Amino acid sequence: MPSRRLKGLVLAGGKGTRLRPLTYTTAKQLVPVANRPILWYALDSLVAAGIDDIGIIISPETGESIKKSVTAWKPSGVKITFIVQSEPAGLAHAAKTAEAYLDNSAFVMYLGDNLIQSGLLPLVEDFRKNTADAQILLKPVENPQAFGVAELDAAGQVIHLEEKPKEPKSNMALVGVYLFTPVVFEAIAKIKPSPRGELEITDAIQMLITMGKIVQSHPMEGWWLDTGKKDDLLEANRMVLDDYCQTNIQGSVDSQSQLRGEVEIGVGTIVKNSIIQGPVRIAENCVIEDAYIGPYTSIASGCQISKAEVENSVFLENCVVSGLQSRLEQSLLGQGCLLTKAPGQPVGYRLMLGDHSVAEIG
Ligand code: G1P
């Protein structure tokens, strides 16, 4: 049997309500993890698995910013096709929107807000050669209610799948990377919208099982994160820094400063009289002065941090943080946030937060 042709399909639409307020101005797939948009990790992973024809589902609202980011990612030798999904009507609806682009090819569907540690190559190679109609990845989780959940028989065969069950039959969650043959479109045509009003890909896979098709499951090796919420995003930041952060100093660091562990400092960044305890990634054109930057912190370009201690946090571009009395921890700051000491004698908190901002203060 000749091996299957495989295209990639990355889902980068949706509203990202769980990451507001960041997602009022940014697509959730473009929120950075270790200073790179989450989406880039999905694209890297497909390319590393030998896939060079990739469709990207975008929404009318954030599609332009996704296109710009993909141009900055600069794929070489990769064909990219953007496909607009007119409304966020579910993952199976997104797949259906791409049916013409997929043109009868088997495909890897990758949710653009998922981040996985292990490479896809063995999985893709296996699917290219075998006769399964679909292949899913499973990972045990502590909160299966938040995911698609698989029930397996004693031999490890998937017997039933359910989207966000109230009473999960197992703790095996569906990872957001799926391999399909075009037969999935027959299954999608048979399913109805779920209680949340969406055509669920989990229901389509369940339909494949009902139709007697072969659905294979693989245990997911390594870590997997769905970066839909703040704490997941900080966790993803920690994982990526642990795996990829490597000392590389391109900016200037004065003799009063100390760098410990793996620290990356971008071009044009100035570090003065500060301690940086890696893993820490600081992008270009930042100023760090009289500060402590603790482990698992990613700082995007143009930030200024002075007289402050920060740790385990992600800052987007052009934030200013100065004169803090306590350490800033587990925080996610959107672009251009200003966090400074109140003038004069501080009397309580003075905040101007965007809609749906979260401030935990003690
Ligand atoms: C989606 C899928 C779910 C899957 C999850 C993986 O959930 O519906 O089955 O387990 O992605 O990230 P959503 O992110 O839409 O809540």
Image (tube, rainbow, N blue to C red):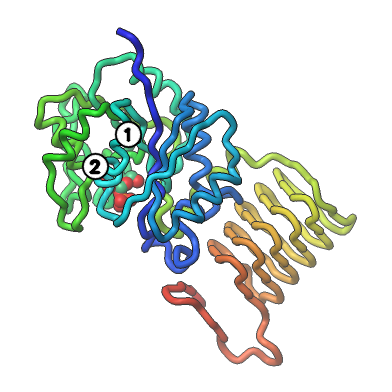
Three-letter residue code for mark 2: Ile
Mark number, residue 178: 1
Secondary structure at badge 2 equals helix
Residue at the image point whose x is 25% and y is 25% from the top: 216
Q: Residue furthest top?
A: 1
Mark number, residue 201: 2
How many circles with numbers are drawn on the protein?
2
Residue at the image point whose x is 41% and y is 58% from the top: 229
At which x and y percent is residue 132?
Answer: 24, 20
Q: Nearer the viewer, residue 106 or 44?
A: 106
Decide if residue 135 is on the left or right side of residue 30.
Answer: left
Give neighbour class at mark 1: few <14, some 14-19, many 20+ (Cα, 10 Å): some
Q: Is residue 115 visible?
A: yes
Secondary structure at badge 1 equals strand
Which sits earlier in the primary sequence, circle 2 or circle 1?
A: 1
Q: Nearer the viewer, residue 183 or 126?
A: 183
- Asked if disc 2 is less than 8 Å from ligand 1, the answer is yes
At which x and y percent is residue 242?
Answer: 59, 42
Q: Is residue 143 visible?
A: no
Residue 129 against residue 150 in the figure, above or below: above
Residue 3 against residue 155 in the figure, above or below: above
Q: Are marks 2 and 1 in contact (CB under 8 Å)?
A: yes
At which x and y percent is residue 334?
Answer: 55, 66
Real-space Cα separation, disc 2 to disc 1, in angstroms: 9 Å
Residue at the image point whose x is 19% and y is 23% from the top: 214
Q: Nearer the viewer, residue 314 or 35?
A: 35
Specify the quadrant of the image occupied by residue 7: top left
Three-letter residue code for mark 1: Tyr
Quarter of the picture holding the N terminus: top left
Give neighbour class at mark 2: few <14, some 14-19, many 20+ (Cα, 10 Å): many
